[in-house]
Amino acid sequence: SNFPNQFQKQSLQLVRHIVPLTSSAFYLIDPDMRHRGVALYNLEPDVEKEYQQKFSHLDPLNPRKFSSTTETVVTIDSQISPAMLKQSTYYQEFMKPHDHRYVADMFFRYAGEIIAVLSMLRHESMGPFTKAELTLLSHLQPFLEYTLNAVYLPKRVAERQSIQTHYSLTDRELDILELVIAGASNKAIANELSLGLATVKTHLSHIFQKTESASRTELLAKVFKSLTS
């Protein structure tokens, strides 16, 4: 089913009817076995890729920083002063070139873990998110979170279990396989999972052995075939 992506697109549409935005993105932290996990509004896919590969670790709103909190809607200005933000590499090299000034992120959790983020962006001319807008967004969050959890997650869990059982993969191998499916390079996988490159390569060779695949292409073909069979 194309559920997550369809739901993400509808959520982006809903949010921009509620608050004025320049652009927005809705991404799943751990995409399921077949989805890249990103829906965008008025944002080039290259910008999102650039963010994931080069800048996410510099983002004051990086979801990892909020994993042990219960905050649901957070603005970049609540995390760093405007003066500090404008001096930062993140602002100078990523936000400014793309004309982003104000950012609010909505976090979605499952069992306490952040599983998805809806990021809302504004040009300088639109002004900061007001208290009333943030209150409105925080009221919308539980509804979106519930829908995401009720429909998307059970499917993802079932898919992961079926692949894991089918090929006798460890949890870590499964994490790596998901990132391979999402198109991540070995280096990107190492960064994402905080592993050494050599460790990633070792895990990958085990995955190739277990799935009897000689290449990434063959691996993907086999996984998709077993998911659809």
Image (spheres, rainbow, N blue to C red):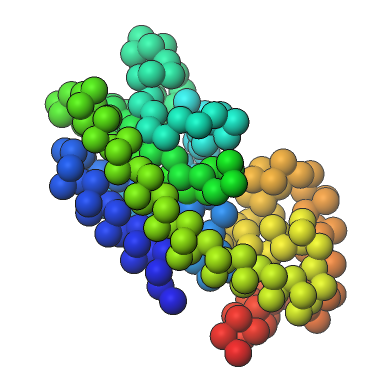
Q: Is residue 20 left or right of residue 69?
A: left
Look at the image and tell me whether residue 116 can be seen. yes
At 40% across and 69% down in the image, what residue appears? 3
- Residue 116 placement (x, y as % from top left): 47, 48
Q: Is residue 3 left or right of residue 102?
A: right
Tell me: residue 71, above or below residue 10: above
Tell me: residue 34, above or below residue 8: below
Tell me: residue 137, above or below residue 42: above
Instruction: Using the image as rendered, state which of residue 152 and residue 206 is in the foreground.
Output: 152
What is the quadrant of residue 122 in the picture? Answer: top left
Look at the image and tell me whether residue 49 can be seen. no
Q: Is residue 192 left or right of residue 95?
A: right
Q: How many callouts does the rendering have?
A: 0
- Residue 146 placement (x, y as % from top left): 42, 53
Instruction: Using the image as rendered, state which of residue 14 and residue 223 is in the foreground.
Output: 14
At 72% across and 41% down in the image, what residue appears? 194
At 63% across and 49% down in the image, what residue appears? 188
- Quadrant containing the C terminus is bottom right
- Quadrant containing the N terminus is bottom left
- Residue 97 placement (x, y as % from top left): 32, 33
At 40% across and 73% down in the image, what residue appears? 2
Extreme residue in the bottom direction: 229
- Residue 170 placement (x, y as % from top left): 81, 62
